[in-house]
Image (cartoon, coloured by chain):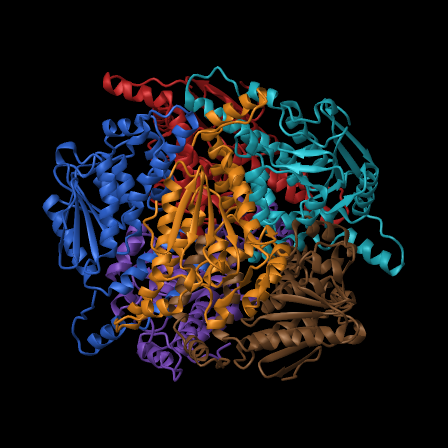
Chain colours: A brown, B orange, C cyan, D blue, E red, F purple
């Protein structure tokens, strides 16, 4: 599965692992990496054998954010018309967003495993994941403010649903560093692990647990939680009723029932 | 007031108590209980003397979730056309939802007092309540995932507004058990009481406090909080301005003012 | 800058301080103060040299809520037609709301520094601020319930986005007192300072940090967080892409880049 | 089926006819009639053998609007507290609305056949129907403006989706009479029939045509058109995809295919 | 009332007339006129004696659109930072929009009386009015396309609710001229009058009719139609129920009833 | 440009023409054609030299709707689990929708030129176009109802914004034929041309007119009209202000101004 230049993607049983793989650059996001993240998660969405995804970074840091050198070059353009230049810039931003939205739109849960720096674009990225776990070495900074820009690939759109409003604002106005303890307290991550080995282990265990559940039920659950965020409760209730009209009576429900009767673990097809 | 088979409903002064009453089944929800919950809360909504409702479970557990035996029978249907069968299933889910939405639509605050198991449909139920309190014996599981289904009577629609997003996803993907301490930390419940006696006592004290407030003001407050969840802030501000144009100048406001002058407790009419 | 009767407004470098200034009345909100809050924040929104605002209360208490004497007089009206009277009341409420919404609509971050009482209308006010900080003497009460009314100038519309839902309901139904420790735990405030001197100091330090950031980036960030609260994530992503098409390529981005190269602090124009 | 006092309800094959039946009062809406309309349409929604509904008025006029005598009595109340009185009034209006919303929520198409006066509440009523047809004697007036009130049971909420905005406003500000020709031009009705016999005939023919279609497909179509009105196109597309995941593969689709092969009319089960 | 430079504002009984008054410039919109339109309609909104407003243009043409000379000068700015320049431009557009939104937000119906050219900004303006009437000399062009810009002060936001979608797009892509006959056919105007005298007469007659209605009922009606455009039907129904809880029981309702009993015209207070 | 099997795509100056090209099948939509429509419009969206698109059908008919033979085969699946089968079906429908949404999302205006049959999926397709024109031979049928299904690729989501509500319902419940005259009356098409030669000529003339306008302004206009349909007017106004902050000051605006001064036709770059 490894046709990627900036990522390494592996899979063991139902658990795929996407590793950001520019460790010498602290996994800074260059144009190639943006694109490959989009590709990788669109591929995993389609790959039936994949049930859960772990997103991690190779090396000391999870992700140092956008690669500024690379980005400056992309933004430079021979275009003379100011409006056309900005039209291109708008399309570029929409494209970068779509690469991270591929994480959110992937129907399998995505667990971020974070060590070292998770700053700038790194936060935009993990905000599109389902859950976040970190080692004690991890730290977080909404770094965009310090390069004089408004974050534009997801942090300001998704993080307010994850951490408390007052903290959200403080962090995005100041760019101050949040260590893993505070990150757990404010709900940015679900748990702190003592070190990277424990993190790897812990997240994998969790991923395997989820991979053992009914894939239909997991997908429906991810879809509903995403839907709830953007719709009224009344709309959400109507949607799940319609969804389950199609999806409830399944081989997985039967298998779960049978396993329960027979006091064994259920086994679900992909 | 006790025309119910699966519930016991009592009232003392302004405080009504709805007790799930199938203790031998750990208060598992059968079709009768779904219906009666809807009926009971619609009746309490109309009952002027009732100002606050406590929802509790008789016996060792609050609620073991849906009664699977009962549900399988309901789902079985002689209908041959697959689409008609699913149309019926959709209507059944909408009906079950409406029974729990009756809790949310009841204009009086509903306080859940939880001991022992609160799993599956039990969580859907308490997510429709205003506040949740538990004894130290309580535990919570989004159990639906383990029977191979996507939860469809409110958990995935209401709980994301109550607990942090990252935790919400972890719990609904894994179905793992949350004890009362963790439940308090994540905001699922407001407080842990040492044991069931303390829980009963604590919740009743709180209920009586609320029952002593202006019923008009309480109703307006519940309405506004519900409205805020599903609308923009601008819409919410316009709504309360229009609401209070009708409801602000009341006998309750006068009584509250008078009591304050006379340094006595106010007494509000139902 | 001090044309106000109930406020004192000062500015030091980019940091403006708005002080509620009726200390003998515990800064209770009379009609004049409502109006002046609106005026002051609209003026600060326009004032280019102002980059951050601190909102504080002179004297022992931050704000004792609405001045009931004053409000009763305003509500009294010779109008005979009941509907016209209520139409006027509705317009009055909309006007009071607009005074606090001026805080939210001010494009500069507003930091509330709170000591002593912050009750009733005081909570509506700080809920419209970006962040809230308090000394250990601070306490909070959603007092409206005790005068028999539904809070109508923002608490029930904005606080549910700031604190957990279960707590939000408990506090607004009971009006019970929350001390500064609990306020920090539930996310109502970001931090507790030991005493008022520490509070003043801490908030000013933070304000100066924010004032040193790119004003364009700060404004964009505030706009996006506000927009996210009231829109879907998809709408938010599209909006920031369009916004940054116009605002990303700025003198501030260049200055930030240059400063980084030259290993110095950036200096941004107003 | 005729347990009603103010309505007569009959059914012939799949076509039910609901006739307003207070001809001596020009079918003015009294409290009983409001209630019975709600009951009748909720019953028809459930009645599987019913596939289409015609709503008509016995006598010279379709409906003269609300029965003012009756309404004044209902509005009178011994309640002393102004706010409680208004709370009751609000609930009354919500109740009247729900009676007409039952027409919209009935899953079978409802065709209004209109002769003579269709004014005030009559327009609210037909605005909740799927289609409107009239004889040349019909006329329409948004009469509420002439009794000094803002129409509150659906006209101002549903008619703007039916007729052009500029005309909508003119008619609701002036209350002026619209004859059947103009009604057809502005889209208020679909067609004018020469006289009442032709109207009856024409609407019945149409109703029978619709009754011969797949009831599953008809219900889905009504649901989608209603959903579109209140949601974005993107939401609507997602909803129908989920709906048809459950409902597309049906006995009706098979029957329609088979009939097409065999060059005969399809026959669908209820 | 005539403190305006570019407008003349008069009032006769309850009917105010706002005349665009730069006839030598075909009433082209310069910065002064934008501002004064905002001021005039905000003043008329507050003026209790005013019940209806006529908006017309002095001279041969209603309005030739934006004054390009004037606008170019406004857009020129010494600002060096591209982003700050665009931030200023954004605020300028928001300001121009707010001047026309003042027409929509004016609680009294606004009737546009149109002769000759109504192009560019003129269409943005009349799209914010309640109803539009024209003489046979009138013509309409969405002229912005021909100066290489996307219309940005309301046409593309409000006109799609007024005219059919297919026509809306054709007109805004081509900028082609629509004469008054076609304008009536597509619903852009309500009626064509033979000449300007007939137009003036006809619109005044209509305005006086509306001015004779209950001002409370008229305001409520305008509010509801505006609300419906931007909300779901369910939200609209809830809003009018709450509104009428406050506004239904009025002196106007009593006067309307009394007048009806006494077979006389009702007379309503301002 | 013609790598397509079921389409022919040509371009002359700025005007591209997409012709459905299965004339022997009356251009019925098979899976290949669905896919190619998506591809073609995504390619044209990106192709800078293309400014306007004409969508037409080769042969006697525009489009006979979905190819039922082809669709039945696609729907057949060896999948045993009912829920997985329906999950696949849902994804298939979403895919078909996305092919037509590519028409709507193409930033260039799309003009449909229609002769003969335009039924079933053909209507879904033209509903995603900007404007529709037809020869007198054209006729339209919402045919889905007659194969026992609820239309699911756009008709029920987009057509209600194009034609009057009452007519929309009649046509989708009955599937009755609408000829080109009626289609023009109800706004389904903008104009009827005498025959196909006149249609071709007329649509090309219009397309060339649009192609001569500023491409930036055209794109902005299409974006805004689409945005308005799905958002409130307030949101729309804010969006265009932000959009034009980026896009207003353009080479096109300058060229338009210059051309106007020099009394010549403007010439805009792609």
Query: Is residue B250 visible to us here?
Result: no
Q: Residue furthest left?
A: D197
Q: How many marks?
A: 0
The x, y position of residue F99, in whole percent, is 45, 70
Nearest the viewer among F131 and D198 is D198
The x, y position of residue D93, in whole percent, is 34, 36
State the residue at coordinates (32%, 49%): B3
Nearest the viewer among F233 and E140 is F233
State the residue at coordinates (50%, 53%): F227
Q: Is B44 located above or below residue B150 in the figure?
A: above
Quadrant location of residue C44?
A: top right
The x, y position of residue C46, in whole percent, is 71, 36
- For this view, does C195 lie left or right of residue B268? right
Nearest the viewer among B190 and E19 is B190
Q: Is F256 located above or below residue C156 in the figure?
A: below
Q: Is D207 located above or below residue D268 in the figure?
A: above
The x, y position of residue C85, in whole percent, is 46, 22
Nearest the viewer among A31 and C101 is C101
Query: Is residue B99 visible to us here?
Result: yes
Quadrant of the frame with the C terminus of chain E = top left
- For this view, does A145 lie left or right of residue E25? right
- For this view, does A252 lie left or right of residue A118? left
Quadrant location of residue D267?
A: bottom left
């Amino acid at each position: 599965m490894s046709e990627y230049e900036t990522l390494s993607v592996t899979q063991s049983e139902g658990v795929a692992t996407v590793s950001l793989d520019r460790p010498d650059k602290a996994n800074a996001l260059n144009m190639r990496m943006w694109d490959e993240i989009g590709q990788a998660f669109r591929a995993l969405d389609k790959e039936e054998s994949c049930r859960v995804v772990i997103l991690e970074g190779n090396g000391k840091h999870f992700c140092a954010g956008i690669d500024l050198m690379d980005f400056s070059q992309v933004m430079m353009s021979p275009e003379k018309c100011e409006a056309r230049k900005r039209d291109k810039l708008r399309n570029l931003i929409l494209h970068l967003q779509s690469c991270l939205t591929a994480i959110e739109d992937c129907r399998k849960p995505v667990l971020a495993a974070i060590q070292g720096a998770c700053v700038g674009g790194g936060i935009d990225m993990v905000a599109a994941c389902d859950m976040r776990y970190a080692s004690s070495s991890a730290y977080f900074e909404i770094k965009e403010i310090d390069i004089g820009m408004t974050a534009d690939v997801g942090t300001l759109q998704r993080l307010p649903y994850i951490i408390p409003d007052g903290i959200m604002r403080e962090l995005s106005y100041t760019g101050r560093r949040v260590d893993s303890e505070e990150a757990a307290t404010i709900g940015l991550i679900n748990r702190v692990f003592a070190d990277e080995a424990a993190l790897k282990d812990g997240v994998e265990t969790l991923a395997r647990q989820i991979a053992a559940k009914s894939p239909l039920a997991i997908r429906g659950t991810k879809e509903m939680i995403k839907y709830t965020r953007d719709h009224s409760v009344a709309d959400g209730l109507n949607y799940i009723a319609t969804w389950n009209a199609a999806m409830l009576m399944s081989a997985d429900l039967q298998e779960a029932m049978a396993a329960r009767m027979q006091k064994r673990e259920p086994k679900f097809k992909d």
